Image (spheres, grey):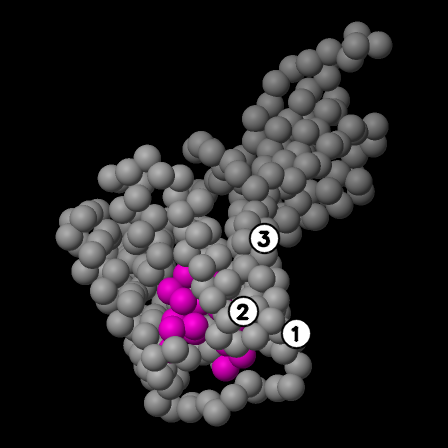
Amino acid sequence: MSDLKLSPRQMIIKEYLTITVAVMIMSIGIYFFKFPNHFAFGGVSGLATVLSAMTGMTASTFTNIANYALLVVGFIFLGRSVGTKTVYATVVMSASLALLERSVPLDGPLTEEPLLELIFAIACPAVGSAMLFNIQASSGGTDIIAMILKKHTSIQIGTALLFVDLASVILSFFVFGPSTGLYSVLGLVGKSLGIDTLIESMNLSKCFTIICDEPDEICSFIIKDLRRSATVYKAEGAFTHQPKTVILADMKPSQAVQLRNFIKQTQKGVFMQITNSSEIIGRGRGFTQG
């Protein structure tokens, strides 16, 4: 269902369901792949991996304590701007890790392939984080530190959080050895690249620039069949000086395939340019009938 058809209450329910699913995906990646292999990258869970080995406390327990402590610090320094989404995500994360620790205790890695497990340790949290960022939500943890730094200091947030991650990775060399430390370095790089790529993929739209002589049939297909809208304006060919019509439209990738095939099958002499965009701002992207 299109977001344009959802009521405010339905939008809220959808957002919190998204947060729940995203945090559970993150928890699975952290608990089953990150903690058993001692991969020390990625905020609180990365630091927990190292400190749990140094203190004897389980990584899940340390993560939960740190998340709740940061939540309290967030309320002290930020007040209500911490947001209900961050509180909810923190609670779901802590509950998920606690439930997994009790119901599926682990004595070691699931497999004997650390590189394979590193991929899942990167992918699951990256997918979850991308889902959260896509709805302007936060999983808590070091995100709260970022919010505090943004409000009260002039320190570059990305730099500060990078130092937290680097500290965990460097400590992993001393606590777990060079092999685990190097895997953690790969994990840190993969995490940074993976989240950005996933966010772009989730927001991907196809943008059409169509130059034609008879726009009515194309516009009718866009509006009635694809339930999208378009912008139409008149132009002139630079060489022939013949009048042309330009149609601008953006849509989901699956709809783009339908429009492209429709134009190829029904229109001749049409110039069509299709580009990718991961960020389109403004109203009028979609079309709904009452």
The quarter of the picture where the N terminus appears is bottom left
Which residue position is annotated with label 3?
Answer: 193
Q: In terms of sequence position, does the residue under pointer 1 or pointer 3 come before the other?
A: 1
Q: Position of residue 204 (x, y in %)?
A: 58, 46
Q: Which residues are the magenta region?
A: 36-52
Residue type marked 2: Phe
What whole-number distance in Å separates the C-alpha atoms at marks 1 and 3? 17 Å
Residue 152 as seen in the image, left or right of residue 244: left
Q: In terms of sequence position, does the residue under pointer 2 or pointer 1 come before the other?
A: 1
Q: Position of residue 168 (x, y in %)?
A: 45, 64
Which residue position is annotated with label 1?
Answer: 115
Q: Foreground residue, 15 or 41?
A: 41
Q: Position of residue 232 (x, y in %)?
A: 60, 23
Q: In terms of sequence position, does the residue under pointer 2 or pointer 3 come before the other?
A: 2
Task: Please name which of the two marks, 2 or 1, marks the residue nearer to the observer.
Answer: 2
Neighbor class of circle 3 (other Cα within 10 Å; few <14, some 14-19, many 20+) is: few
Please tell me which residue is depicted at 79% across the width and 34% down the height of the picture.
267
Which residue position is annotated with label 2?
Answer: 173
Name the quadrant containing residue 69: bottom left
Residue 131 as seen in the image, left or right of residue 117: left
Residue 167 as seen in the image, left or right of residue 86: right
Asked if the stretch drawn in magenta spans residue 266, the answer is no
**Is label 1 in a helix, a strand or a loop?**
helix
Task: Please name which of the two marks, 2 or 3, marks the residue nearer to the observer.
Answer: 2
**Is label 2 in a helix, a strand or a loop?**
helix
Residue type marked 3: Leu
| Above or below: residue 71 compared with residue 104 | above
State how many labels appear.
Answer: 3
Please tell me which residue is depicted at 31% across the width and 52% down the height of the picture.
145
Please tell me which residue is depicted at 54% across the width and 69% down the height of the picture.
173
Task: Please name which of the two marks, 1 or 3, marks the residue nearer to the observer.
Answer: 1
